Amino acid sequence: MRKTRLRVHYLEFRFGSSRAGKGLDRCGTLNARLILGESITALVKLLFLVKRSWPSTRHWSTEELELLGVGPDLIAAIEGALLSPEKARLQALAKEADRFLEGQGETFHKNGQKLMQ
């Protein structure tokens, strides 16, 4: 069950970020921000799951992620994407998230074909 949830949250994050970027291209800032919010929520759930913890309540996410050892660079990238959604920031966030996963020994995200199964 854990592996399935890892894949689902990762795909929600990546597809949502991509869709938000496309929304920004169409000058749909509201649309892009709504989609990005859902995407970031999936990423935060993923981070808790990787750390083998239940997600915190949303208003304690930063503090709980810090307690679990999620680095300040990733937290800053998440906050930056929310505060100023730009395609470059979304791409940087995706790379930072992948680095985090690899640093935690996770490899499920590296094989795109297997990820979709």
Image (cartoon, rainbow, N blue to C red):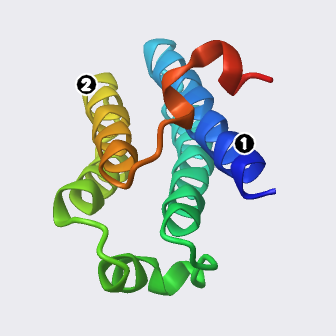
Residue furthest toward the front?
105
Q: State the residue at coordinates (70%, 49%).
A: 3
Q: Give the vertical position of 84 relative to 14 (above or below).
A: below
Circle 1: element type: helix
Percent of width and height locating residue 24: 45, 22
- Residues at marks 2 and 1, CA–CA distance in whole angstroms: 24 Å
Q: State the residue at coordinates (57%, 40%).
A: 13
Neighbor class of circle 1 (other Cα within 10 Å; few <14, some 14-19, many 20+) is some
Q: Is residue 82 left or right of residue 76?
A: right
**Quadrant housing the N terminus:** bottom right
Percent of width and height locating residue 66: 30, 79
Please state which of the two labelled residues, at mark 2 or mark 1, is closer to the viewer: 1
Q: Is residue 3 left or right of residue 46?
A: right
Q: Is residue 95 left or right of residue 73?
A: right
| Of the pair 30 and 18, the residue shown nearer to us | 18
Q: Quadrant of residue 88?
A: top left
According to the picture, the residue beneath numbered tag 1 turns out to be: 8
According to the picture, the residue beneath numbered tag 2 turns out to be: 88
